[in-house]
């Protein structure tokens, strides 16, 4: 097949970077988890005796190393894995193996690589933003974010389900503390943090119950995904476990009507915590459904798919309208994030390689775009001294770079082609047509109009018109605000113009576990005209 | 890999590279940005002309490579060049360059110049992507991107409220159209297993009316057909060169181009619907143009009306072609619809770009005055602008032997054959077209200046006048593809095959009809709006007619009612329910009771120390884990 000059050049460049040797790969997975944890410990123990600059330098290392590991893994994975299988497997028996079948087992497959990369990139951006911003008790702030980052890297490289769950808790607890101590509004942050804690802990408990139920009923010898897959290839597990996982994971991902924790939490949380939670940690549940629940319990999805469909439509349509009613910028973003999770759930509901693949693309893209938007919303709010969009205006003149990045981020969020989100939406919409209820595709596509309405109105309110006098002194983005945003936008853009980098391995990994839906017999390819000259 | 695909890659990617460069340079280097953008447009034009004149022989050419694969979904990146896209490539690159040049003068003093020219280059990239796209998904991608560039360029004057609301409106209304369009593409994909245009062209049995009409939704949005036409007049809030390039010559015509690309998917029912939507749009927009006083608004409604002509031409022309069958007369009868539509698209691109640029020249000279009742006598002050504007007016009115005459003639002919009532309406619309254009020209250019600004107006610089002259030449000569080498040979040949010609007997009738319609309209306008009049005679003497025209049949009011009264209320109610019932009762009151009780107990463990919470938590996890393991073992 003839290749197009420009894109084949990009392609061969990407392949050249794959040539690195893979033997060090498991080490990278371990470093990704340990580096932020060690840096957190260093700051925790020595932070009070070190100058703030040194603390920040340590934090930089703690955020940069995972990002490096993530990119290295993504590049190397392409060279070794042709079929989307688990690679770079590494395990350590921690003495729990005999008792509970638990061991620390790391590895990535075609589904987890995008999520692993997402965790690395968003972690670096959120870390850089946290290091640059002026907050009280910054060392502790950074320690908590580093602990979060360590957990995030662990979630998506764990093959063992106990550690998969464990790392989630590891990242979740600092989120509560960050909101309670550094939340936006003094009066309500403790309440919000407490509500979030109760809600998400409940979700996590249900999830854990489901995972244990899965393990026990499958009769697998070890509590890791590979063993479970082998065990369930022959045996079956009760479908009620799927419901348990669906509700548990659903709470964690803000599935309608378990979503009400999200908007207040995100509008209250300090920006880096919101970025890490909304961008990455929240994807734990969707990842669990795609990687664990659906492939292991396909009959469960068959049984509860209708429920999932209705709830996910609640996310897209009902919360879509709720988003239109929001006046506070961060609350709007929090609701918009809930709405977009509906798309990912719908992709899972479609139960096909396409649907799940679209959901993974959506998770990846949404993670980048939502953290970009929370970062920029924080920058807007700090300048305007308010989050109420009706009271802001004309900021494009006082902060043109902020305006440009905000518009680009908004466009990415609402699925403009050229950014990764578009692929997620497009593939999910297309997949839904082959779901048991094709009309769901129509309802889902209606979401593109809803999201355009609230997103563009926010842009118009904040950036158009004449600026207020007090805004003039606030100025444009500074380096520490600008570069993390550019990093996130660049990642969205790269996947936006070169989706094949991910889709190839994603496709291979999903094809082992998900059905390929029938398409009309492809028409004979046109060969007589393709070489007309 | 061969020369053709490299050349097409060059044409498509040059503007993207240009936009990237402008972005890197930042907003302070406005002149450099303008230079880059115009240079890019020049490269595109030269490369396109080179491709069409020297490289491409007229055989359909297509090339594709996979871009995204998730079984069985496959999205290709590729090019598909055939007669339709070659003609469109010519129009976009040629008209695009002259409008870029015009912008140099028009935007010379703008404070956000770099942003403007960057946006212009992004637009060129997106538009060329639509023209060259090999499949419907790829076309949709660039379709959305032109919407985005249109959005940022309409919003160029961001201090004004009009720009803020018009840019939003354009994007959202287009998304409503794209809602149907995307569903249509998805349906096409699942029906045929591909959306590749060359493959579909060969194997398209199984196309349904629903599929065609869903695809047509995209046309409704992008080409501003009723009922999604409301965004286009508002889009005039953007700078005038944008109105010329995006909202008259190229982007809004993309809908017509889409129809021409997918004509084989339309069955008779769909074609009839398409034809009538176009006819009604043409009629209504012409009625609304009478009561407009803003020079750009008159042209905007005229654009709506002419787009209606093109869409009607496609619908009725293809219907007519289907009845003729292959081999009848000359060329391909089934192409008559797309031939007439694309031909009118081409001539319209010349004369409407000319008219918009002419209005830009006037606005520039009159210090951003856009009210025609504050102009007057400009013909003498600005002779070249005046003369070229006159040529544009005559071409749009369909005066014989100018470009617009030939293309409108082809449309009226096929409509007469396919649907006589529509023919009557479109002929009546042709009279109205000549009338409102006559009104515009008499009031703005003849008579005496009605304001200070008009009094002191003088001719624009050469960068603005030269494009006017070039476009005026094409507005005269654009119809003679059969006689003169106006277009590249392959394009000429395509037009020769596709554009329907009346038989020799009918030709005379059509000529007389056109002559009466155009001259009659211009004369009627002269009677009502004498160049010397100081105020609008229609508004003064025939108030009900004027008010009807002015009301624009209340589409905007109905939509605003929906947005403010229905949508906002539904959103508000849902928001209240969300926070009251789900958040309030569901997750606070009910669990609050349970957890409150537990809390009484756990408060004893509350030490206020973060570390303690962590240990309590892990203790709980392990306890739960142990209990659950036992519990499940006994259950199953």
Image (spheres, rainbow, N blue to C red):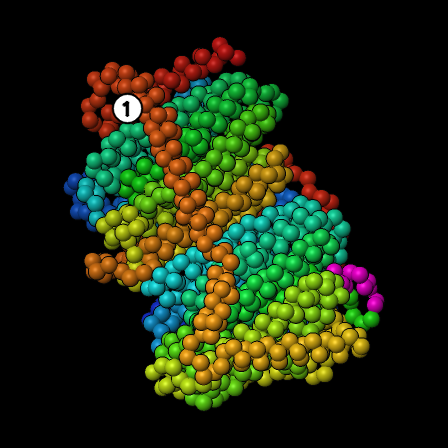
Name the residue at 49% across, 87% down: B384
User: Looking at the rendering, in which quadrant would you find the N terminus of chain B?
Assistant: bottom right
Above or below, A245 against B166 in this view is above
**Residue at numbered disc 1:** B615
Relative to A134, B251 lies left or right? right
Residue B612 point in image, percent of width and height: 24, 25
Magenta-highlighted residues: B317-328
Residue found farthest to the top: B634
Q: Does the magenta stretch include residue B327?
A: yes
Q: How many labels does the image show?
A: 1
Residue A465 point in image, percent of width and height: 32, 60
Badge 1: residue crowd in 10 Å (few <14, some 14–19, many ≥20): few
Above or below, B563 against B17 in this view is above
Q: Is residue B325 magenta?
A: yes
Relative to A461, B512 lies left or right? right
Magenta stretch prevailing secondary structure: helix
Relative to B171, B582 lies left or right? left
């Amino acid at each position: 097949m003839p290749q197009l000059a420009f894109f084949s050049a990009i392609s061969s460049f990407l392949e050249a970077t794959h040539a690195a040797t893979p033997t060090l790969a498991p080490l990278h997975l371990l470093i990704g988890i340990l580096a932020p944890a060690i840096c957190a410990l260093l700051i925790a123990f020595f932070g009070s005796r070190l100058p703030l600059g040194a603390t920040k330098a340590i934090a930089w290392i703690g955020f940069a190393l995972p990002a490096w590991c993530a990119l290295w893994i993504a590049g190397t994975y392409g060279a070794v894995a042709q079929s989307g299988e688990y690679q770079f497997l590494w395990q350590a028996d921690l003495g729990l193996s005999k008792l509970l079948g638990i061991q620390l087992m790391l590895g990535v497959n075609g589904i987890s690589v995008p999520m692993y990369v997402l965790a690395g990139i968003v972690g670096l951006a959120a870390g850089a933003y946290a290091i640059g911003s002026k907050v009280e008790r910054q060392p502790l702030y950074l320690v908590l974010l580093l602990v979060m980052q360590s957990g995030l890297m662990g979630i998506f490289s764990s093959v063992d389900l106990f550690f998969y769950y464990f790392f989630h808790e590891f990242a979740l607890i600092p989120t509560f503390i960050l909101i309670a101590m550094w939340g936006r509004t003094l009066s309500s942050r403790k309440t919000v943090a407490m509500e979030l804690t109760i809600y998400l802990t409940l979700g996590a408990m249900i999830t854990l119950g489901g995972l244990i139920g899965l393990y026990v009923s499958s009769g697998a010898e070890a509590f890791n995904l590979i063993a479970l897959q082998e065990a369930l290839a022959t045996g079956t597990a009760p479908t009620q476990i799927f419901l348990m996982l669906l509700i548990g994971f659903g709470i964690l991902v803000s599935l309608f009507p378990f979503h009400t924790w999200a908007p207040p939490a995100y509008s209250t949380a300090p920006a880096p915590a919101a970025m890490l939670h909304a961008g990455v940690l929240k994807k734990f549940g969707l990842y669990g459904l795609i990687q664990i629940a659906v492939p292991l319990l396909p009959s469960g999805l068959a049984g509860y798919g209708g429920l999932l469909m209705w709830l996910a439509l609640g996310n897209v349509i009902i919360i879509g309208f709720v988003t239109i009613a929001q006046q506070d910028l961060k609350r709007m973003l929090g609701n918009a994030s809930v709405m977009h999770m509906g798309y990912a759930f719908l992709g899972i509901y479609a139960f096909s390689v396409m649907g799940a693949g679209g959901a993974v693309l959506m998770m990846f893209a949404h993670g980048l775009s939502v953290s970009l938007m929370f970062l920029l919303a924080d920058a807007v709010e700090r300048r305007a001294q308010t989050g109420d969009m009706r009271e802001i205006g004309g900021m494009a003149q006082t902060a043109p770079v902020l305006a440009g990045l905000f518009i680009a981020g908004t466009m990415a969020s609402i699925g403009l082609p050229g950014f990764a989100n578009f692929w997620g939406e497009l593939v999910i919409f297309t997949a839904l047509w082959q779901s048991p209820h094709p009309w769901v595709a129509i309802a889902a596509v209606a979401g593109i109009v809803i999201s355009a309405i609230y997103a563009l109105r926010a842009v118009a309110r904040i950036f158009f018109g004449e600026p207020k006098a007090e805004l003039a002194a606030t100025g444009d983005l500074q380096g520490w605000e600008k570069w993390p945003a550019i990093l996130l936008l660049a990642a969205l853009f790269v996947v936006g113009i070169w989706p094949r980098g991910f889709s190839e391995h994603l496709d291979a990994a999903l094809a082992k576990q998900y059905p390929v839906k029938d398409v009309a017999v492809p028409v004979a390819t046109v060969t007589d005209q393709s070489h007309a000259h | 890999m061969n020369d053709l695909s490299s050349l097409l890659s060059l044409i498509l990617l040059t503007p993207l590279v240009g936009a990237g460069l402008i972005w890197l340079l930042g907003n302070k280097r406005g002149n450099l940005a303008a230079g880059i953008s115009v240079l890019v447009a020049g490269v595109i034009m030269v490369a396109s002309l080179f491709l069409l004149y020297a490289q491409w022989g007229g055989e359909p050419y297509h090339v594709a490579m996979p871009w995204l694969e998730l079984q069985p979904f496959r999205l290709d990146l590729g090019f598909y060049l055939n007669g339709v896209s070659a003609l469109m490539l010519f129009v976009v690159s040629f008209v695009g360059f002259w409008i870029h040049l015009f912008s140099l003068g028009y935007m010379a003093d703008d404070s956000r110049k770099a942003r403007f020219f960057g946006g212009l280059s992004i637009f060129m990239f997106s538009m060329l992507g639509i023209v060259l796209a090999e499949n419907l998904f790829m076309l949709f991608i660039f379709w959305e991107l032109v919407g985005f560039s249109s959005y940022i360029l309409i919003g160029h004057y961001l201090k004004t409220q009009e720009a803020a609301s018009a840019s939003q409106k354009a994007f959202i209304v287009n998304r409503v159209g794209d809602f149907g369009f995307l569903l249509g593409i998805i349906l096409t994909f699942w029906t045929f297993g591909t959306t590749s245009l060359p493959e579909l062209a060969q194997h398209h049995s199984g196309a349904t009316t629903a599929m065609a009409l869903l695809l047509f939704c995209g046309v409704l949005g992008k080409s501003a057909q009723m009922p999604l036409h409301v965004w286009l007049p508002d889009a005039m809030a953007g700078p005038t060169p944008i109105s010329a390039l995006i909202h008259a010559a190229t982007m809004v015509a993309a809908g017509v181009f889409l129809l021409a690309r997918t004509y084989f998917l339309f069955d008779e029912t769909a074609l009839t619907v398409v034809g009538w939507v176009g006819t009604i749009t043409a009629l209504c927009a012409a009625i609304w143009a009478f009561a407009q006083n803003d020079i750009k608004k008159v042209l905007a409604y005229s654009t709506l009306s002419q787009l209606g002509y093109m869409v009607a031409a496609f619908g009725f022309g293809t219907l007519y072609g289907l009845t003729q069958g292959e081999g009848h007369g000359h060329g391909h009868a089934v192409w008559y619809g797309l031939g007439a539509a694309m031909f009118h698209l081409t001539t319209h691109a010349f004369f409407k770009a000319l008219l918009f640029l002419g209005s830009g020249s006037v606005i520039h000279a009159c210090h951003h005055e856009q009210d025609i009742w504050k102009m007057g006598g400009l013909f003498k002050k600005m002779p070249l602008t005046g003369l070229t504007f006159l040529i544009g007016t005559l071409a749009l009115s369909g005066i014989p032997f100018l470009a617009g005459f030939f293309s409108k003639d082809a449309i009226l002919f096929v409509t007469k054959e396919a649907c006589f009532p529509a023919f009557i309406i479109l002929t009546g619309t042709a009279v109205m077209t000549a009338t409102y254009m006559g009104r515009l020209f008499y009031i703005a250019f003849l008579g005496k200046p009605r304001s200070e600004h008009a009094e002191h107006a003088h001719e624009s610089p050469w960068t603005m006048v030269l494009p006017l002259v070039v476009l005026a030449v094409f507005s005269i000569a654009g119809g003679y593809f059969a006689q003169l080498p106006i277009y590249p040979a392959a394009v000429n040949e395509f037009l020769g095959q596709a554009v329907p010609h009346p038989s020799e007997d009918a030709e005379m009738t059509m000529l007389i009809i056109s002559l009466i319609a155009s001259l009659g309209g211009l004369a009627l306008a002269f009677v009502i709006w004498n160049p010397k009049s100081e105020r609008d005679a229609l508004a003064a003497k025939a108030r009900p007619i004027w008010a009807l025209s002015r009301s624009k049949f209340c589409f905007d009011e109905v939509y605003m009612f929906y947005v403010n009264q229905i949508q906002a209320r539904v959103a508000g109610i849902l928001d209240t329910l969300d926070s009251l019932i789900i958040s309030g009762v569901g997750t606070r009151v009910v669990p609050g009771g349970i957890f409150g009780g537990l809390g009484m107990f756990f408060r004893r463990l509350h030490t206020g120390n973060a570390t303690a919470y962590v240990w309590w938590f892990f203790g709980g996890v392990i306890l739960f884990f142990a209990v659950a393991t036992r519990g499940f073992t006994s259950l199953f």
